[in-house]
Amino acid sequence: MSHHEHTKFTSSAGAVLAAVGSAVGMGNIWLFPYRVGQYGGGAFLLPYFLFVALFSYVGLSGEFAFGRLTGTGARGSFDYAMRTLGWKGGSLLGSLPLLGVLGIAIGYSVVVGWVLRYAAGSLTGSLLRSQPDAYFDHLAVSFGSIPWHFIVIAATVAILVLGVAGGIEKISKFMMPAFYLFFLVIALRVAFLPGAVDGYRYLLEPDWSYLLRFETWVMAMGQAFFSLSINGAGMLIYGSYMKKSENIIRQSVMTAILDTMAALLSGFAILPAVFAFGIAPNSGPSLMFITIPRVFQQMPGGQVLSLFFFLSVLFAGITSLINMLEAVGESLSKGTGLPRKASMAVVGCVTFGVSVFLESLPAMGAWLDAVTVYVAPFGAVLGAIMIYWVLGLRAIRAELMEGRTRPLGRAFDFLAKYVYVFLSAAVLVLGIAYGGIG
């Protein structure tokens, strides 16, 4: 039996939950609720849902299908596509999306380390006995989070060493249901707080005038694109682990639905609580690490809810890191012949070796801004071009029909080749113009 046959998800649910684990991350939690309220509440949800549907149907499914067709990650897949035209250099081009993924993982690991520290502080009660500003300022400084940061990366590598079915799939089947359960408990508790209705109003009450603003559509597009983890590498490697019997379109749609549910659930858990205690909503690290602890300090049963919150965020962060490091580690293993354990250890060491110098908030923020605005979107554009213009629609359509009985919709070709590819390029250009859109 070949190596490729060994590395498969064992079930449809496992494949979807692994993909959802990659997609659900900090953007769902610290940016989505704020952005919805900032751009017209319920009105923002219309373009957001539209872009999620489009990007999952032709973008996410394309990356899944490309990976399953080639049975490998970005470098091998790009090389496969280029060779169909007799061209060389695919492996080199495939390294660019991997650099974006690794860059995000480096900055992201710092944040997940902070989350682990906050989960521990919630468990002991030290977080709620402290001033949130001081607690975070003490942590988010140069070399201020080394043990927590190291534990996060070491745990991620340990999961990856266990393999696709025994590590990635098994941990995703536990962590992602726990994420939804914990957030649901928080959302239900928050619903009974006096003043919570203002948070729901901020999140859902539509201001239709925002639909006439170009920026609303830009931000909805960026939020949808980045939320689905379309980057030319991460979802591609998970696609390579899907069985031929899987209906990729269905897997993509389920991933998008569950990712959107996570974003909405985060909004229902966070914003009503923020409004109930008269605290101004904001976005980014300050929402998660300063505003939310203030809320839990004032809420009956706050310590338990704080623990639930930071554990759920930790699970979302770990499952996202798993995907990023898997994409890079698989490529290293295939490219060098290193055993899986060694390649994952090398990627973990590189990630920690760079990120340990980014533990201050300004350094982490500057690093992630550069990677998410310039590097990662460029990798996503390369992936889109490689799938639909270099490899071509015929090969991708044939792969998408594996495990599927109904034919693809007539609009698929046009949406994929002419709408999705150019919108992915627009995400890159507009992200640079706006200084980040997702």
Image (tube, helix red, strand yellow):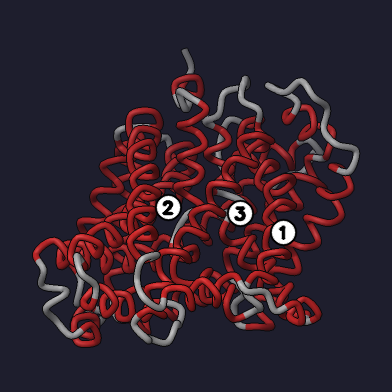
Earlier in the chain: of badge 3 and badge 1, it is 1
Q: Which residue is mark 2?
A: 320
Q: Which residue is mark 3?
A: 230
Between the C-alphas of marks 2 and 3, the distance is 12 Å
What residue sits 66% from the left and 41% below the top? 79
Q: Amino acid at mark 3?
A: Ile
Residues at discs 2 and 3 in contact (Cβ within 8 Å)? no
User: Disc 3 vs disc 1: which is toward the camera?
Assistant: 1
Q: Amino acid at mark 2?
A: Ser
Question: Is there any visible trace of residue 21 in the rendered image?
Answer: yes
Q: Which residue is mark 1?
A: 51
In the image, residue 22 sits, relative to residue 99, either above or below, namely above
Element under disc 1:
helix
What residue sits 40% from the left and 49% below the top? 180
What is the quadrant of residue 360 in the picture?
Answer: bottom left
Query: Percent position (x, y) of residue 176?
Result: 39, 44
Element under disc 2:
helix
In the image, residue 302 sits, relative to residue 166, either above or below, namely below
